Image (cartoon, rainbow, N blue to C red):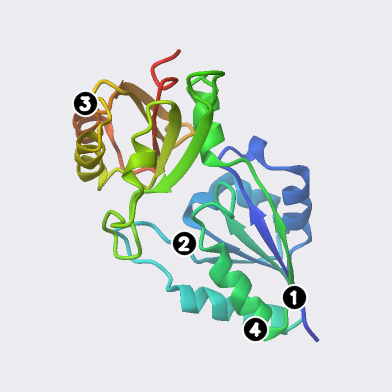
Amino acid sequence: MSGFVSFVSSGPGDPELLTLKAVDRLRAADVVLYDDLSSGPILSHARPDAELVSVGKRAGRPSARQEHVNRLLIDYAGTGARVVRLKSGDSGLFGRLEEEILALRAAGIDFEIVPGVPSAMAAAAAARIPLTRRLTARRVQFVTGHDVTGALPQDLNLAALADPTATTVVFMGKRTFAELARLLIGAGMSPQTPALLAESVSTPAQKIVRGTLGTMEEIIAREGGDGPALILLGPLADTD
């Protein structure tokens, strides 16, 4: 007998930003495998008798290996359980969703994906800005600030990222932003490009700090905490 896995996106952290489908799947789950950023009050929607298993991954901290997470999904579903794999933000954005999907497919286990509010959209909402603007910000691009080793990816399209008419959102980029900023300036991006640090978005610890590409390294050093953060670059980042 095989169970079923629901990949549930929990949004940026505020339980009020959960979708109705996400709440429904949490209430029905026998097992919830959750990320660190999807814990706390969000887990209150799970049944009292549901098994809650932490499999969180945080940069620079001891984390569950991806192979172990895959094995847990297969083993729990193999017992016939209804499994929720709870991921922060939207699971399809830098959430290692594909690795887990491939493992389930190889094991013959069915699944669904429940989308959620991406942290980039929540950050823009918290900063009271749109991500696009006619004529001056027609394109939005998302990029990760580190690769599997924790270093800045070496295959970045710097010409695209330095486009002054695009809104660029850097995920997981605090540790590598100084290097990224130097590369972007070298690729022609103005140091005066508006920039915004959005940390712990939609939680009580939320922090929004505005600056420029040239000052963001200092802002991160001075204002950055240990919460999850995004860095927004582009013409809209200085708007309030």
- At label 2, the amino acid type is Gly
- At label 4, the amino acid type is Ala
Q: Label 4 to label 2, Cα distance in Å?
A: 23 Å
Secondary-structure class at tag 2: loop
Sequence order check, earlier mark of 1 and 3: 1
Please state, as top left, top right, bottom left or bottom right, where the N terminus lies in the image.
Answer: bottom right
Q: Mark 3 points at which residue?
A: 215
Is 230 displayed left or right of 33 in the figure?
left
Q: Label 3 to label 4, Cα distance in Å?
A: 47 Å
Closer to us: mark 4 or mark 2?
A: 4
Q: In this view, does 14 lie above or below 84?
A: above
Which of the 4 image quarters holds residue 163? Answer: top left
Please state, as top left, top right, bottom left or bottom right, where the C terminus lies in the image.
Answer: top left
Is 34 displayed left or right of 180 in the figure?
right
Closer to us: mark 1 or mark 4?
A: 4
Q: Name the residue under label 4.
A: 106
Q: Name the residue under label 2.
A: 56
Contact, mark 1 vs mark 4 (Cβ under 8 Å):
no
Contact, mark 1 vs mark 3 (Cβ under 8 Å):
no
- At label 1, the amino acid type is Ala
Is 44 displayed left or right of 121 in the figure?
right
Contact, mark 3 vs mark 4 (Cβ under 8 Å):
no
Identify the residue at image location x=62%, y=52%.
Answer: 43
Q: Label 1 to label 3, Cα distance in Å?
A: 50 Å
Sequence order check, earlier mark of 3 and 2: 2
Sequence order check, earlier mark of 4 and 2: 2
Q: Mark 3 packing: few (<14 Cα in 10 Å), some, or many (20+)? A: some
Q: Label 3 to label 2, Cα distance in Å?
A: 32 Å
Q: Where is residue 237 in the image (x, y as percent from the top left)?
A: 41, 22
Q: Mark 1 points at which residue?
A: 81
